[in-house]
Amino acid sequence: MNRVIISGYSSAVGLKMHSSVSGGTVYNVFSEVQMLGDSGLAITAEANENQFFGCRFIAQTSTKKGISVTDANNNSFFGTNVETSDFGVWIGGAASQNIFFGTRFENCDVGIHCEGSSAGNTFWSPYFSSNTTEYEDSSSSSNVSIGGGFSTATSAVIMVNNDKRLM
């Protein structure tokens, strides 16, 4: 899907990707797609191996999640933008091996939130702007954010399970 706007209605998600059978919602590619709703995008239940390039996710009510990934694996986000939500990216359940490269988190209460048994989710060079909290990880396994973390002129940051180290 290329260069479209997907807009949810009242109490709806801009786009929900859900697979009721293994391999049912896989290998989709989205480029320059804008997703708006109470939450921008929800990926659940084995909706795996999807790719997002230059997409924008907006939670219109500012009380939901820009991107929610639960029990889904190997989804890739490149140069995406998440705005105005409680959680920019919320990762939970057994979600693993999802990668976010160069994602911008703007005006979120929490830019990145990981919980549950989620593991191996990686955030390369995130850009944070006007968020209350940039990153929190209460998961039982390791999720990693490497580089970036810039909201003003700072050093690069490596974060592993809330252990923040300057580079």
Image (tube, grey):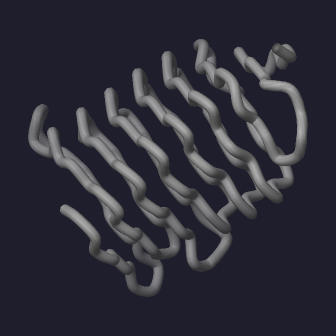
Seen in the picture, residue 99 relative to 88 is either above or below; the reply is above
On screen, residue 155 versus residue 16, left or right, reads right
On screen, residue 9 versus residue 67, left or right, reads left
Q: What is the x, y in percent for residue 72?
A: 34, 34
- The furthest residue to the bottom: 10
* Viewer-nearest residue: 126 or 114: 126
Name the residue rendered at 25%, 41% in the picture: 50
Seen in the picture, residue 127 relative to 105 is either above or below; the reply is above
Q: What is the x, y in percent for residue 90?
A: 57, 45
Name the residue rendered at 54%, 57% in the picture: 81
Q: Quadrant of residue 124?
A: top right
Q: Quadrant of residue 26?
A: top left
Name the residue rendered at 33%, 77% in the picture: 5
Q: What is the x, y in percent for residue 3?
A: 28, 70
Q: Quadrant of the N terminus?
A: bottom left
Q: Quadrant of the C terminus?
A: top right
Query: How many circles with numbers are drawn on the protein?
Result: 0
- The furthest residue to the front: 153
On screen, residue 67 versus residue 87, left or right, reads left
Q: What is the x, y in percent for residue 57?
A: 49, 63
Name the residue rendered at 21%, 49% in the picture: 29
Seen in the picture, residue 22 relative to 108 is either above or below; the reply is above
